[in-house]
Image (cartoon, rainbow, N blue to C red):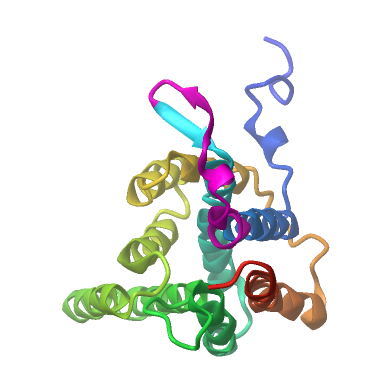
Amino acid sequence: MGDKTKGWWNIKKYKCLSGSTLKMIALVTMIIDHIGAIIIHEFPKALVSLFSVGSQRFSLYMIFRLIGRVAFPIYCFLLVEGFLHTHSRKKYGINLLAFALISEIPWNLEHTGTLLYKEQNVFFTLFLGFLGMCFYEKYSQQKVKQVALLLGLFVFSAVFKADYTYKGYCLILAMYALRDKKLIQAIVGSSIVSWSFSTFFGFIPINMYNGKRGFIKGKFLKYLFYAAYPIHIMILYIVKAKYIGY
């Protein structure tokens, strides 16, 4: 029969990515996405098709955006993991809301060059998802109240126009509810964020997660990871304002 711990069929051997590695994958792909959306998009030559696959044409801009689509499912997965393992959910929620508020200034500047923009940054989406998980768990024995609160957040996420709107909120709840069913989680999650086929590839590193924290430990590195979001957005704003304009 052979050694069942060896060979391609041994799923456990593919569980080789720590939480820290997932964070770096999410961060790098997100930055690539934002570079494409804010900087690359402004150059006409970057919008010209480089090659085609079937009827789908690929430009430099589209390549950047397709790579970037990998990030959001990973961030949602990390949010769920953080929710399940944090020592203080209250502090976890406060941190999400605090960075949502901090990030709003560079987020608005990046998109419009002003302090006003109709959509809100992704930290608000993560915070709404966090609240959804709290309500899902706290009112598990009070179904009417649970459903009412979750639907209320669903409507608010659409009206508030947090990044990815209601689809982002739904993805977080789906990933939480299906956390023990990885294959179904990937299928359902990909269906929710079906606006880009490349989003599916975000579930590959998720399913390679080994459950270990990795090298990002301690408060400094934890908050540095949070801060990387508003910092890189501010840098992109400065680059665009100085060299491209609005």
Q: Position of residue 233 (x, y in %)?
A: 63, 73
- Work out whether residue 240 or residue 153 is closer to the camera in this orientation and state it: 240
- Work out whether residue 100 or residue 171 is closer to the camera in this orientation and state it: 100
Q: Position of residue 235 (x, y in %)?
A: 70, 74
Q: Residue at x 35, y 68 (%)?
A: 165
In this picture, residue 64 sits left or right of residue 194: right
Q: Is residue 104 above or below residue 196?
A: below
- Work out whether residue 86 or residue 142 is closer to the camera in this orientation and state it: 86
Q: Position of residue 5 (x, y in %)?
A: 72, 26
Q: Is residue 41 magenta?
A: yes
- Work out whether residue 32 or residue 48 is closer to the camera in this orientation and state it: 48
Q: Is residue 222 above or below residue 31?
A: below
Q: Residue at x 50, y 73 (%)?
A: 111
The magenta region covers 35-55
In the rendered image, is residue 147 in sight? yes
Q: Quadrant of the N terminus?
A: top right
Q: Is residue 168 magenta?
A: no
Q: Position of residue 63 (x, y in %)?
A: 57, 41
Q: Residue at x 45, y 76 (%)?
A: 130
Quadrant hosting residue 168 = bottom left
Q: Point out the residue furthest to the top here.
A: 1
Q: Is residue 237 above or below residue 194?
A: below
Q: Point out the residue furthest to the left here.
A: 144
Q: Residue at x 74, y 62 (%)?
A: 213
Quadrant hosting residue 222 = bottom right
